[in-house]
Amino acid sequence: MLRGIRPKLTVCHMYPDLLNLYGDRGNIIAFTRRCQWRDIHVEVQQVNIGEKVSFEQMDFVFLGGGSDREQNLMAADLMEKSGYLREAIEGNLVVLAICGGYQLLGKYYRTITGEVIPGLNILDLYTEGGQTRLIGNVAVEVDLGGVRQKVTGFENHSGRTYLGNLEPLGSVLAGQGNNGEDKKEGARYRNVLCTYLHGPFLPKNPFVTDYLISCSLKRRYRDILLEPLDDSIENSANQVMLNRLIGS
Ligand code: GLN
């Protein structure tokens, strides 16, 4: 794939013991396996509360979802690391943040009990907890790297997220998305993708996984060519869900 060298990517899994709703760890597995199938070496580093991390050395950072209680437990620790994370994001670090992780990259998350969990203020967005939870399967149209595709996932959140001067990840075809009102789902900034979709998201949507792998390789090695894989099983699973949600 790359002339003369075997590429290596370092994956950073943030707070795997706290941010782990709905099998979010499957996102790490999908990223890793799709690299290995192409002979790209992957090292996964787990970072827990109190542990140091050098974001600059990382190629892909993953922040999963968590309950309000778990978000509260790790938010202060993440805040301590926020300066380095912000710098790395400005340097095009590739990040996927799901649900609770997504909310914490914004200005704040006010839970339904009125408690305010301060965010890192890296992304221009905020989240207000709502009385009802937004739960169910979701279909979203996204445009990544000039390719338009429908992705699917499962959402379960009390938080309603509102974007400031920021692009959404995609537009909602079925389900609630960011807030159930504006048809926006997720957010994008540089190489950061945020979404409410669990699933896990990446095993369900290999097209997104490959986009993140490509961005990681481009940032580290510049010259990349990602060989296609056989995604027929994943794509037909996705199609079944799309038929159910939006018709064929
Ligand atoms: N606790 C947050 C909410 O309810 C995030 C939930 C999640 O990560 N699924 O909005």
Image (cartoon, rainbow, N blue to C red):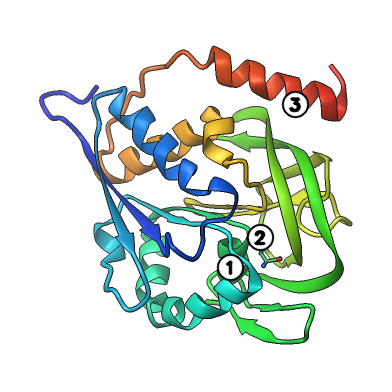
From this viewpoint, is residue 145 visible? no
Q: Which mark is residue 123?
A: 1
Q: Earlier in the sequence, mark 3 or mark 2?
A: 2
Is 215 in front, or is 245?
A: 245
Is 85 in front, or is 139?
A: 139
Image location (x, y in percent) of residue 138? 76, 40
Image check: 51 left or right of 81?
A: left
Q: Where's the N terminus, which quadrant?
A: top left
- Please state the quadrant of the image where ligand 1 appears: bottom right
Q: Secondary structure at mark 3?
A: helix
Near mark 3 (Cα within 10 A), the count class, few <14, some 14-19 or many ≥20, is: some
Near mark 2 (Cα within 10 A), the count class, few <14, some 14-19 or many ≥20, is: some
Q: Which residue is mark 3?
A: 241
The amino acid type found where label 2 is placed reads Leu
Image check: 202 left or right of 99?
A: left
Q: Secondary structure at mark 2?
A: loop
Q: Earlier in the sequence, mark 3 or mark 1?
A: 1
Image location (x, y in percent) of residue 71? 57, 73
Marks 2 and 1 close (CB-CB < 8 Å) = yes
Identify which residue is drawn at 63% across, 67% down: 67
Q: Earlier in the sequence, mark 2 or mark 1?
A: 1
Foreground mark, 3 or 2, reads 3
Marks 3 and 2 close (CB-CB < 8 Å) = no
Q: Which mark is residue 166?
A: 2
Is 168 in front, or is 155?
A: 155
Image location (x, y in percent) of residue 198? 62, 46
Task: Looking at this view, name the residue that lies furthest to the left.
Answer: 4
